[in-house]
Structures are given as C-alpha cells and as structure tokens.
Amino acid sequence: MLRVIGLISGTSADGIDAALCEIDGAPPRLTARIVRAETLPYPPVLRDRVLIAMQPGKAGADALCKLNFEVGTAFAAAAQTIAAGEAVDLVGSHGQTVWHQVEPDGRVSATLQIGEGSVIAEALGVTVISNLRARDVAAGGQGAPLVSYLDWLLLRHDHLWRAVQNIGGIGNVTFLPPLSDSAARLVAFDTGPGNALIDSAMALLSGGAQHFDRDGALGALGTPDDAWLAALLAHPYYAMQPPKTTGRELFGTGYAAGLIEAGRARGLNDADLIASITALTARSIAAAYRDFAPAPIGEIVIGGGGRHNPTLIGMIRAAVGAPVRFSDDLGIDSDSKEALLFALLAYESWHDRIGTLPEQTGARHGSVLGQITPGANHLDLLRRTHCR
C-alpha cells in the first residue's frame, strides 16, 4: 500500500484540489481510498494570471515560464497542507492546463499543463509524477478524458450501462459497460462546456464580483431561450465523432462574452442569460448521450463541481430522462474525484502500468503516463516497490 497525494486545478482555475489517498493492489483488484481531501483556492492575483494565460496571445514565454514555477509553488503548498506532517510516498500532479491545441480535424497536436514538478519534489522531499497528459497525445490520443480510467477501474455496474458524467469547467462522459458484459468497451469524450461558460458569464455580468452561480440561484430565476439554444447546439463540436476533447480555448471567456452580447440583442436579462447558458451545458450533455451512447443508459453518475448547481442538475434530469446519482453515493467524493484520479494514475505509472485505454482517448495504444521527478525518498521507494 502506498500513500499518494493527488493534485489538480481544472479549467475553472478556482483552486487546487488535493487528496491524500491510500492505494493498494493492481487491476482488476486495485483499491483506492481518500484519507482526506481539500480544495485550496489560488490567491486571487495568481488565479487572474492563470486565466489570462489561457487566452490566446495574452501570455508570452516569459510570463508562462514564471507562472510555471509559481503554480508549482502553490501546488507544493497544497500538498504540504493535505499531508499534514504525515509520511507520503508519492505525488501525482496534473498541474494547471493553460492550453490544449485541438486542430480543425479534431486531432490534438499539443497540450500544456504548468506547475513545475521539480518545485513540488524539492518542497516535499517526495517523488513526483507530473505532466500526465503529454504521453497520450504523443501516442496520437486526445490526452483526455483521463478520468475515464478511474471510472473503468472503480465504477462499473453489475448489469447496467452507466454514463459517468464529470462537470468541471468542461464536461466529460464515460459510457461504462456492465461487469456482466466482458466484450463491450468504454466510450469516453468531452461533451462540451461544463461550468466554464456559466462561471465566465457570471464574472462578466457581475464585473468580477461573482465567479460562479452559487446554488444555481440566478439560473433558477430565468427562462432559457429555446430558439437560441437550438442554434447554439448546432456548433460543430457537438456533432464531431468521439474521441474528442475541448477546453477554454473554445468554450472560454471569449465565447461567454459573445453569448452575453447575443443574448442582450435577443432582449434577455441577466437571469435569462444564465438560465440559457446553464441549459446549454445540460442539453449538450443530453445530445451527447442521444448521439453517441453505445447502448441505452440505465444510470447517470455525476461528479465534479457542477453537481453543486441544482438548477443544472435539474435540467440534466429533464433532458436525459435516466436516473441520476452522484459519485458520492458510490463512495467517491465528487469534489475530490479528480484529485483521486491523479493519485491513482501516478500509482499506476510508478508500477509501470498503463493509465489509458485506446478507446478512451483515441491513442494508438495505452501508455504509462507522466514524467518522474525523484524526491529524497526515491531510492527507498524503489527498494520497497520494485526490489522484491
């Protein structure tokens, strides 16, 4: 058994999710348990600089270089907080995505996550595995959704097909075959916007005073513009065949600003705008299920920050029609699932095992993910885990 810290900040850049996990065994008998988890907000100035770096042409090499180390320092502080002075064997750090290059044909040609692993290893004295998406992209994959591998290992139902829907800044789904079907394989891809457009619109409408629609309160007061939504759902991304990925480079602040301008021209007030943008996330998820699910979906399992928006969840229930559960119901804290994922992927990489499936990302083959930065415990960890 290893004690592994998982770290990630998602496309919303609202903070660093950190989880101390205990992981043991090997697939298919792998076990993973979150000991404790916490989200530690970025300092406001650092968050603003991260969000600027996600916008095309806004951050040069000098700014990204400095930001890489500063985000690494913030990640190291989060790891120290969650370790709480206890011994840790390994850290798996996703870092902060600032760019994910999707070509017009849907191929991902590059991806960039910052948060220097060496800074974390130096601060904790613990071996770090970071930059986990790049290897899959090098193998011809989308580099996402990586969370599908956790779903495959831990969340399959005995006899139902499940749609495991994560709603972070971007939404992604894993269509999981039941354990009773040994021949079927998963299907996974990004469904489109998750919280990103809602969050960006709230920030723009409030002049930066609000960064998200708390409890879906403003969206609940408005009425979605159905005719406008039908036009928005004609965006070519939604019709692209999986595997596919997207990010704030498409569904980010610029897109949200365009939606606000278009909504105003349609006579929508703030509540109607947020209701319509929230409905866009819900209906794009429903469209993905309708168009790409390989079998009828018996159950939806939702995780990620979007599960705290009851207006969004209600819209998803109405649009999809299948029973909805939360990953918390299955023993995986929704808010910490992605942190658990990167602890799990680091654990698998340390044991020289793949962390992706070809049908998950579209890569030519599964890959052992990430780059290892040895910490002070490196030789001891090697002896304990590889010299038996």
Image: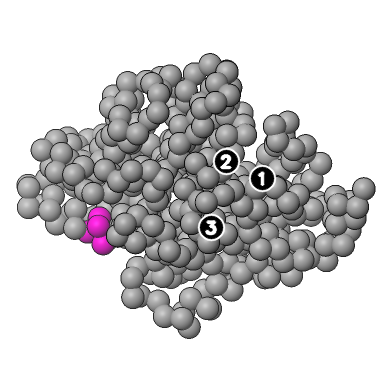
User: Badge 1: how crowded within 10 Å, few (<14), some, or many (20+)?
Assistant: many
The amino acid pointed to by label 1 is: Leu
The amino acid pointed to by label 3 is: Ala
User: Badge 3: how crowded within 10 Å, few (<14), some, or many (20+)?
Assistant: some
Name the residue carrying label 3: 139
Q: CA distance from mark 1 to mark 3?
A: 21 Å
26 magenta-colored: no
Q: Are marks 1 and 3 in contact (CB under 8 Å)?
A: no
Query: Left or right: 143 with respect to 86?
Result: left
Visible residue check, residue 176: yes
Lower position in the chain sequence, tag 2 or tag 1: 2
Question: Magenta residues?
Answer: 252-257
Visible residue check, residue 79: no
Name the residue carrying label 2: 149
Query: Left or right: 277 with respect to 244?
Result: left
Label 1 vs label 3, nearer the camera: 3
- Residue pictured at 49% horizontal, 18% vertical: 160
Provide residue 190's location: percent of width, then percent of height: 40, 45
Label 3 vs label 2, nearer the camera: 3
Query: Left or right: 50 with respect to 74?
Result: left
Label 2 vs label 1, nearer the camera: 2
